[in-house]
Image (spheres, rainbow, N blue to C red):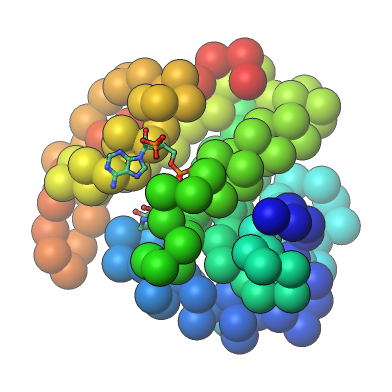
Amino acid sequence: MIIRLLNPGEGAPAARLAGLAPGAADWPASEYERIALDRSGSAFCLVAEEPAGEMAGLLAATLAAGEAEVQNLAVVPEKRRRGLASGLLTAALERLAAAGAQSVWLEVRESNQEAIAFYERHGFRRAGRRPGYYASPPEAALILTLQKP
Ligand SMILES: CC(C)(COP(=O)(O)OP(=O)(O)OC[C@H]1O[C@@H](n2cnc3c(N)ncnc32)[C@H](O)[C@@H]1OP(=O)(O)O)[C@@H](O)C(=O)NCCC(=O)NCCS
């Protein structure tokens, strides 16, 4: 597995990958391009290649005033349960800790048992619930957090 930053020009394949993973945020290619071009250090997108040269997973995160947020995470269905998301999250947490993150937050649909199990396996804890947070279909969000990544 290779973990690296998303490059400018890779917005379209990143959007295609996330489109294969219902449960991931459905961002347009332009959103990935914006993050790939970010030079402020406040946003990044990591991709996992498996095998080398084949984009199989991605994770996007932001950091502001010591608070980080995992904004998107997706692994293509045929390459799940092989540690790709774990590799992406571990690399992202290292970057965020080095950049001064004190806590990491995220929202997840409360029916998304696989993602909730994944994050809890990595030490995230339930910190709240936002009723009606999601549309199409409407659903509550669970708020998960990891302190001192
Ligand atoms: C959630 C997701 C990113 C996990 O990716 P992955 O590469 O399969 O995760 P890993 O292989 O690193 O899994 C690590 C651990 O997480 C937990 N886990 C992952 N998928 C799970 C599942 N379907 N059911 C139960 N536990 C699961 C397990 O503890 C797993 O360890 P194990 O395989 O030794 O049992 C993937 O299922 C996905 O892309 N889902 C759709 C998009 C999504 O929901 N994104 C999250 C939005 S908040």
Label tally? 0
Q: Is residue 61 above or below residue 49?
A: above
Residue occupying the point 82% across, 47% down = 41
Question: Considering the image in quadrants, where does the N terminus appear?
Answer: bottom right
Q: Is residue 147 above or below residue 116?
A: above
Question: Which residue sits at x=63%, y=64%?
Answer: 50
The residue shown at (74%, 68%) is: 52
Whether 77 is drawn above or below 114: the answer is below
| Above/below status of 29 relative to 7 | below
Q: Is residue 11 left or right of residue 27?
A: right
Residue 102 position in % (x across, y down): 65, 18
Q: Is residue 19 left or right of residue 83?
A: left
Residue 11, percent from left and from top: 65, 79
Q: Is residue 1 visible?
A: yes
Quadrant hosting residue 5: bottom right
> Residue 28, position in %: x, y?
51, 79
* Residue 122 place in picture, x, y as percent: 47, 26
Quarter residue 135 falls in:
bottom left
Residue that extends furthest to the right in the rendered view of this protein: 39
Q: Name the residue furthest top.
A: 148
Q: Quadrant of ligand 1?
A: top left
Q: Is residue 63 in sight in this rendering? A: no
What residue is shown at x 12% (from left), y 58% (from top)?
A: 138
Quarter that holds the C terminus: top right
